[in-house]
Amino acid sequence: MNSIRSTLLVFCFLFSASWALAEPPNIILMMGDDHGWDEVAYKGHPHLKTPILDEMAATGLRLDRFYSGHPTCSPTRGSFLTGRHPNRYGTFSPNWSMRPEEITIGHLLKQAGYRTGHFGKWHVGPVKKASPTSPGAMGFDEWLSHDNFFELDPVLVRNGGEPKKYPGESSEIIIDDTIRFIGDAQKKKQPFMAVVWFGSPHEPYMGLPEDLALYDDLPQEYAKKKVKLTSVETGQASTQVLRDVLQVRYAEITAMDRAIGKLRDHLKDAGLRDNTIVFYCGDNGVPASGNGATNPFRALKGSVYEGGVRVPGVLEWPSKISSPRSSDLNTVTSDLLPTLADLVDQALPDRPIDGASLVPLLTGEMKERPSPIMFWNFDTRPEEANSDKPYIDPKLQEGTTPLIKMMAGKYTRTFRNYHHPVIKDTDYNGSRTLLHERYKLVIDGEKDNGIELFDIVRDPYETTNLAEELPAITASLQDQMKDWQDSVLKSLTAADY
């Protein structure tokens, strides 16, 4: 028995020693815009060509139950940056900004000696220099960014300056600037963290001829249906044939995939591949404009059901993940901050954190998630009552980077965030979910649906409501949800600052 115990201790010591970080890893965190869970070839998609993401999934860590922190983009991006649910700081929906007091992965990694950069879509406030929630204000040394999404020939802002058009395919443009940033960090002999948020494949869709040609033969059945999306000519709503829409959407995804390949090739050529973490995920489920033509899950973008929040997730770190693995553990964008803090030995911010460190998952030791994942579509209609109490000067919330899609009569974006000093009963409303191990509680997921409970392992498509069959589990999860909402709303009053 003693010899067995000694052998186990030696094994554990060697395993831990193999994970001791001789030097800090470089970090690249990428995210697609409106990229649904199934829209990769490695998930068996019948049409898409994504050879680079397929290779990452085949050689690294494939996160098969990865979730966006919210079913829409701005809130998910807030969770990605802060490790906190976005309702804690009023980033309720697209074009709602963060608050300047939030602490991000940019702040933490910069404090740990990293060179930090942001490239692409920002969408948690304007990217101009005066904005108190610009990438620079939120911990990034440099940025080439857009207030919202972008297509071919994007207009971007570098380090808070004047907007400038960058001709070319947008994913390649931001990857080329990321490569430049990496080279500069190498010259300074600094580890680097690059946050790369693509504008693809968000509508309106624009693709290069060579990418469009890959999808000339989509099934004719898609030509029988029409969908609504933005016209690239007018920037306003239009109705188009689904087959044509999917051809351009898929072309954008393939172009993004190719740009990721260019980045990986550079890391290899520069001798950086082994000790660089390369991560990719989506920011929410597939939108109605993409029609969810192949989406297997219930609902689409905007919903707390699986189709709104399940997204692709893959991670590479060759020096530590030397053989391919897949994980069925529930993981989420809020996990990034505590994971990075753990890796670079930085203390977590002294405030409620909703994510969990995934370092034990990377080492192969994590068998179950330590805490549930929560999703909450805050009902913003009563929030308008606070509109006379802006959290940030409205002039500083005006975006500067134009995009094709018109909103509120203009081609730029205006952000909002309000003081919320008093908690009201109505603040608890909105569709919401608690996901813990195999069970998923859904409250008001759809109109008049009330309380639902799903065994998400046996029933990933959320077809069978078990709430009446399992009342004890349902009640327990409801209590946990209420306690969590209490905490979130306390944060919303700015009590964390």
Image (cartoon, helix red, strand yellow):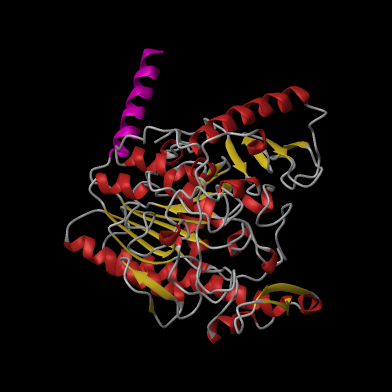
Give the left or right position of residue 55, taking residue 118 as reference.
Answer: right
Quadrant of the drawing holding the C terminus? top left
Residue occupying the point 38% across, 75% down = 163
Residue stretch rendered in magenta on the structure: 1-20
Q: Is residue 382 above or below residue 176?
A: above
Residue occupying the point 31% across, 38% down = 18
Q: Position of residue 425 (x, y in %)?
A: 66, 33
Query: Could one spot residue 218 in this view of the protein?
Result: no
In this view, the residue in front, 489 or 123, is: 489
Q: Outermost residue, front direction?
A: 388
Q: Is residue 205 above or below residue 424?
A: below
Q: Quadrant of residue 218?
A: bottom right
Q: Position of residue 140 (x, y in %)?
A: 31, 56
Q: Quadrant of residue 485?
A: top right
Give the left or right position of residue 255, taking residue 19 as reference.
Answer: right
Quadrant of the drawing holding the N terminus? top left
Give the left or right position of residue 272, taking residue 431 as reference.
Answer: left
In this view, the residue in front, 164 or 464, is: 164
In this view, the residue in front, 109 or 444, is: 444
Q: Outermost residue, top direction?
A: 1
Residue occupying the point 74% across, 22% down = 472
Residue 51 belongs to the span the image colors magenta:
no
Query: Could one spot residue 442 in this view of the protein?
Result: yes
Residue 7 belongs to the span the image colors magenta:
yes
Q: Position of residue 204 (x, y in %)?
A: 60, 74
Give the left or right position of residue 439, taking residue 251 as reference.
Answer: right
Q: Position of residue 9 (x, y in %)?
A: 35, 23
Q: Is residue 425 above or below residue 142?
A: above
Disc tally is 0
Q: Principal SS element in the magenta part?
A: helix
